Image (spheres, grey):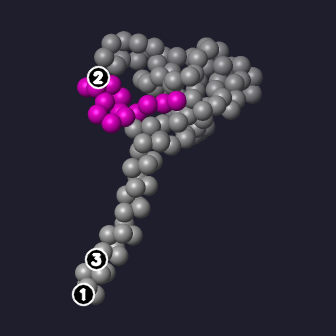
Amino acid sequence: MRPIRLLAVALALLAAPLGACEVLEAETGRIITLYVAGQTATCMGMVEQQCLLVRQEPDQEWQFFYDGIRGFTYEPGYLYTLQVLRRHVPNPPADGSSAEYVLVRVVEKTPVGVE
């Protein structure tokens, strides 16, 4: 085998696991922390609805969260710190999200006004 061809084959074999890692992460998802406010807010998606207010860092502004979190039951009046699995949804419906969120665990649940 020619040295250049051998090098090309070796590089292809080395690159394959990197691509596989990206595919695996897309399939299995990534665990993130979400902070959830003690109240919901009116937001506009396809229709007017109530959205959770979330942020990924304690010092960020609250943002509308249009998706649900599977396994999480929101209770107004509590601030939540959640660990959530975020997965990519391949071929989502036109009116659906390209991400799915699944509760891993409730890290903290604090009554509003108590810090």
Tell me, yes or no, if residue 99 can be seen here: yes
From the image, tell me which residue sits under label 1: 2
Name the amino acid type tagged 1. Answer: Arg
Q: Nearer the viewer, residue 73 or 65?
A: 73
Q: Position of residue 94 (x, y in %)?
A: 25, 26
From the image, tell me which residue sits under label 3: 8
User: In the drawing, does residue 97 fall left or right of residue 81?
Assistant: left
Q: CA distance from mark 1 to mark 2?
A: 53 Å
**Within the image, what quadrant is residue 83 found in?**
top right
Tell which tag, 3 or 2, sits nearer the viewer: 3
Q: Tag 3, which secondary structure?
A: helix
Q: Which mark is residue 37?
A: none
Q: Is residue 83 above or below residue 110?
A: below
Q: CA distance from mark 1 to mark 3?
A: 10 Å
Name the amino acid type tagged 2. Answer: Asp
Q: Position of residue 26 (x, y in %)?
A: 41, 44
Q: Which mark is residue 95?
A: 2
Mark earlier in primary sequence (1, 2): 1
User: Is 105 part of what is drawn in magenta?
Assistant: no
**Within the image, what quadrant is residue 91 found in?**
top left
Q: Position of residue 25 (x, y in %)?
A: 45, 47
User: In the drawing, does residue 88 fall left or right of residue 40?
Assistant: left
Q: Which residues are magenta?
A: 89-102
Q: Quadrant of the C terminus?
A: top right
Tell me, yes or no, if residue 113 can be seen here: no
Q: Position of residue 24 (x, y in %)?
A: 44, 49
Q: Tag 2, which secondary structure?
A: loop
For the point 55% across and 40% down, the residue is 32
Q: Is residue 2 above or below residue 94?
A: below
Q: Main secondary structure of the magenta part?
A: loop
Name the amino acid type tagged 3. Answer: Ala
